[in-house]
Amino acid sequence: MELIIGSHVSFTKDDQLIGSVREAISYNSSTFMFYTGAPQNTLRVALDENKTKEAYALMKKNNIELKNLVVHAPYIINLANIKNFDFNIKFLKEEISRVESLGIEKLVLHPGSHVDVGVDVGLKNIIDSLNMVLTENTKVIICLETMAGKGTELGKNFDELKTIIDGVKYKDKIGVCMDTCHLNDAGYDLTNFDLILDEFDKKIGLKYLKVIHINDSKNVINSHKDRHENIGYGTIGFDKLIKIIYHEKLKEIPKILETPYVEKHAPYKEEIEMIKSKKFNDNLIEDILK
């Protein structure tokens, strides 16, 4: 089975999904992730059905399966604090509708920050919000992302994610997106990734794991800072990340790179090449800048 790996790509007003596919192909990706609009605002262009169909055809030609595509929800949505409750519910429903229109089933969502209401109330707010948004007819799976625990972020450990999932009515519409940088920064030792998977399986269940963000970290374990680094250039290291990427239990799960640009250049083609060869390139930065 081919490695299911790709990166974050753009989704522009003019090219939409076909542009995203072309960018992914240029990196030799077999999947990709994108925002349907700017993550920090509500501006969204109408979806062009013809461009979507054109994108499907190009994906088929390049062996990119629709079931492996991922959309990331805007991070201005915060379900953990009800200060902007009506806005959050309305915008998330609209985003789900857009993702469904594109035929994509995985929507990654940051659980949210409780700000000042506390962990328990914050978790209840997330549960209540998801139960308002998800119905038996929802075609999208909301993939809650594991977070670094910066500030008052929720979803920083498997217990918090378990609490949310336990409270959601339509459990077939909910999943988890692991982020390797966030796990490290939250205090999980990726040296013992099998133990992490065992804990996840025991508390939540591996069937809920739908996406993995592959990022190195600029920070030491348990720093709660959330700053991504290029593959092999951070504190996690190349060998640990390769073991996660090629883990037997994760072979059917899309892996998405969100590593930082190098002087405004996307690093994904070179990083994917490095991952596929399983050999660390200590000249990666120079190769990207060529």
Image (cartoon, rainbow, N blue to C red):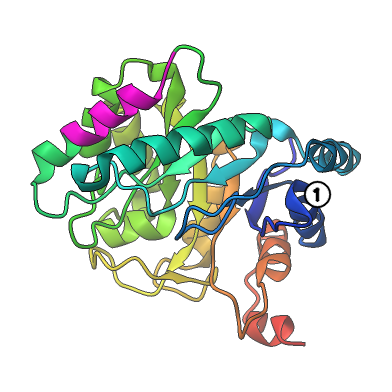
Residue range of the region highlighted in magenta in the rendering? 124-135
Mark 1: few/some/many CA within 10 Å (<14, 14-19, 20+): many
Q: Is residue 62 above or below residue 240?
A: above
Counting from the top left corner in percent of width and height, residue 58 is at 88, 43
Quadrant of res 235: bottom left
* Residue 6 located left or right of residue 64: left
Q: How many marks?
A: 1
Q: Which residue is mark 1?
A: 18
Q: Any magenta on residue 79?
A: no
Q: Main secondary structure of the magenta part?
A: helix
Counting from the top left corner in percent of width and height, residue 248 is at 56, 36
Q: Any magenta on residue 134?
A: yes
| Residue type, mark 1 in image | Ile
Q: Residue at x 39, y 75 (%)?
A: 218
Quadrant of res 172: top left
Q: Residue at x 12, y 44 (%)?
A: 119
Counting from the top left corner in percent of width and height, residue 180 is at 42, 55
Q: Is residue 232 above or below residue 58?
A: below
Q: Residue at x 87, y 44 (%)?
A: 62
* Residue 222 located left or right of residue 21: left
Q: Is residue 147 above or below residue 280?
A: above
For the residue pair 179 and 152, the one nearer the viewer reads as 152
* Residue 213 located left or right of residue 273: left
Q: Is residue 241 visible?
A: yes
The quadrant in which the N terminus is found is top right
Q: Residue at x 53, y 27 (%)?
A: 140
Q: Residue furthest top?
A: 136
Counting from the top left corner in percent of width and height, residue 208 is at 43, 27
